[in-house]
Image (tube, grey):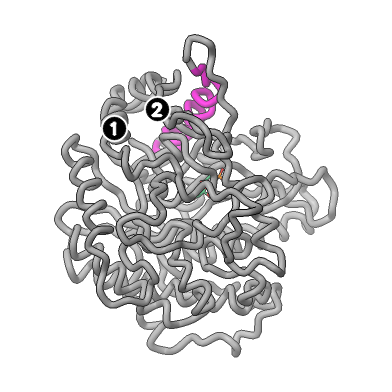
């Protein structure tokens, strides 16, 4: 048990010690973030006159990491999932020599975790690639990125092989049909509207991941390298077979497609149907025989996944649109409450997710993200009484315990945003997930000071009792 973050959302120091710009550095803050990225004019230009760029400063973890890790240690974290900023190590992405100053930061961060007995869990690429690769190479649709990524991954694996056992190759790789800007560097102006490019980018990522896994296993036998995807438990609106079939297809597309390739080492049988759905001609994709062999030889050791909410599929169009569910859309579930951002809160859905994934793949599972984004109120005495967050997490931990009793092999749990950080989908600070409050607002105003929320002490007890005292 521990917590999870991502470099681009908390480190700040976006241009320090040789770091290059990343795609996250070019994403404006605010609820309009996704629509800006989806507009035909957006071309990755940073426009500080009109927008704020919260990822530039994050919560300045780069300079405060010792204080932050000490707080994680005080909660008793056994594991800490974080990502490495690719653009700190290879500022433009296509260099051949890594930036030593960037590596030095992660040397210190890892050592700080180990000092407290906290197991580092590293995501090699979390919604962040060097901006240069998106602008000049057109993002992951370009095969050249396989070589750049693998070079980067090899630097990390080689350097940290004796200190870090658990790795993940790409964060939420399955989000690309919705979030290809973040995960693939693709926006409409560089081909993101054409789903052929998204599928080619996926393939290139699969190959890069497989090569990394293969390299890691050859380097050191006991390294555990996982994939990472979003799981969205998906219910049918009703028993109408039309809705049931649509639900099954949505599950295959969203919850299985990427996992099938990365865990089983081959494309699933429904791939052709998926291509047709998105107007992709299979013959337009560059997928070589060698690639397919590599996929087979680079299967991951475990599935890491994020779980926040469930979805309801209504092909027949009945029900009320769930507009807050940016990822899968669908309709509202009358049996569930929603977060302030319209995400359906469904802890039973996590038990379902665990059983479903384990039943299909029989590899260990790791819940590497889960949590409630909420607006926290600081009381006059400085306290933050986030009972809603405690309630959310408690129910999800109960669900995990039930899944373990069901027979699922669960490796760990690292709730998202254990310290407040910048939201990925909206660039807001006010959408908070942390046990630790950070005094910064959406425009970056505030002291940056850290303070403990009520959930801090609660989670500390949960960890100390290994999930018994909830
Ligand atoms: C996941 C991402 O999608 O959800 C994180 O891996 C992200 O990067 C988290 O922050 C929560 O989403 P959001 O949009 O509320 O920050």
Q: How many marks?
A: 2
Point out which mark residue 450 bears: 2
Q: Quadrant of the C terminus?
A: top left
Query: Do the residues under discs 1 and 2 have CB atoms within 8 angstroms?
Result: yes
Whether 251 is among the magenta residues is no
- Residue 338's place in the image compared with 215, above or below, is above
State the extent of the magenta-drawn residues as a range.
Answer: 384-404
Spatial separation of the CA atoms under disc 1 and disc 2:
9 Å
Q: Does 324 sit left or right of 450 as displayed?
A: right
The residue that appears at 66% across and 80% down in the rendered structure is 280
Of mark 1 and mark 2, the one earlier in the sequence is 1
For mark 2, does the 10 Å Cα neighbourhood hold few (<14), some (14 to 19), or many (20 or more) residues? some
The residue that appears at 31% across and 69% down in the rendered structure is 152
Point out which mark residue 167 bears: none
Spot occupied by residue 313 in the image (x, y as percentages of width and height):
73, 51
Mark 1, secondary structure of its residue: helix
- Residue 448's place in the image compared with 197, above or below, is above
The foreground one among 180 and 378 is 378
Point out which mark residue 67 bears: 1
Q: Does 2 sit left or right of 384 as displayed?
A: left
The residue lying furthest to the front in this view is: 49
Q: Does 41 sit left or right of 158 as displayed?
A: right
Q: Quadrant of the N terminus?
A: top left
- Using the rendered view, name the quadrant where residue 5 is placed: top left
């Amino acid at each position: 048990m521990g917590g999870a973050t991502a470099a681009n959302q908390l480190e700040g120091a976006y241009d320090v010690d040789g770091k290059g710009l990343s795609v996250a550095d070019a994403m404006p803050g605010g609820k309009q973030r996704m629509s800006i990225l989806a507009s035909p004019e957006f071309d990755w230009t940073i426009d500080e006159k009109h927008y704020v760029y919260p990822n530039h400063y994050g919560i300045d973890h780069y300079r405060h990491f010792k204080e932050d890790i000490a707080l994680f240690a005080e909660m008793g974290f056994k594991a800490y999932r974080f990502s490495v900023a690719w653009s700190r190590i290879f500022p433009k992405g296509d260099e051949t020599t890594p930036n030593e100053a960037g590596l030095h930061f992660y040397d210190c961060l890892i050592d700080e975790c180990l000092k407290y007995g906290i197991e580092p869990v590293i995501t090699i690429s979390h919604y962040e690639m060097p901006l240069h690769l998106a602008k000049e190479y057109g993002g992951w649709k370009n095969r050249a990125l396989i070589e750049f990524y693998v070079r980067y991954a090899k630097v990390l694996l080689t350097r940290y092989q004796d200190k870090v056992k658990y790795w993940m190759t790409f964060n939420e790789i399955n989000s690309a049909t919705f979030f290809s800007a973040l995960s693939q560097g693709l926006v409409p102006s560089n081909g993101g509207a054409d789903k052929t490019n998204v599928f080619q980018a996926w393939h290139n990522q699969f190959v890069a991941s497989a090569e990394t896994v293969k390299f890691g296993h050859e380097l050191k036998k006991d390294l555990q390298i996982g994939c990472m995807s979003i799981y969205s438990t998906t219910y049918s609106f009703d028993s109408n077979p039309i809705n049931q079939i649509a639900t099954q297809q949505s599950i295959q597309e969203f919850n299985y497609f990427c996992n099938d390739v990365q865990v089983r080492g081959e494309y699933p049988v429904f791939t052709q149907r998926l291509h047709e759905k998105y107007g992709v001609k299979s013959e337009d994709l560059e997928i070589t025989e060698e690639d397919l062999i590599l996929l087979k030889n680079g299967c991951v050791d475990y599935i890491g996944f994020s779980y926040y909410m469930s979805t309801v599929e209504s092909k027949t169009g009945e029900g009320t649109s769930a507009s807050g569910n940016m990822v899968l859309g669908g309709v509202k579930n009358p049996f569930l409450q929603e977060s302030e951002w319209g995400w359906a809160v469904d802890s039973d859905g996590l038990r379902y997710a665990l059983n479903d994934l384990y039943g299909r793949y029989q590899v260990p599972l790791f819940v590497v993200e889960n949590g409630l984004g909420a607006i926290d109120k600081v009381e006059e005495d400085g306290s933050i009484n986030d009972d809603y967050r405690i309630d959310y997490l408690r129910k999800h931990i109960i669900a995990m315990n039930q899944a373990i009793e069901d027979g699922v092999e669960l490796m760990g749990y690292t709730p998202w945003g254990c310290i407040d950080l910048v939201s990925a989908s909206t660039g807001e600070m006010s959408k908070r997930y942390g046990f630790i409050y950070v005094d910064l607002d959406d425009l970056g105003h505030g002291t940056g000071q850290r303070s403990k929320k009520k959930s801090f002490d609660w989670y500390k007890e949960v960890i100390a009792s290994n999930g018994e005292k909830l």
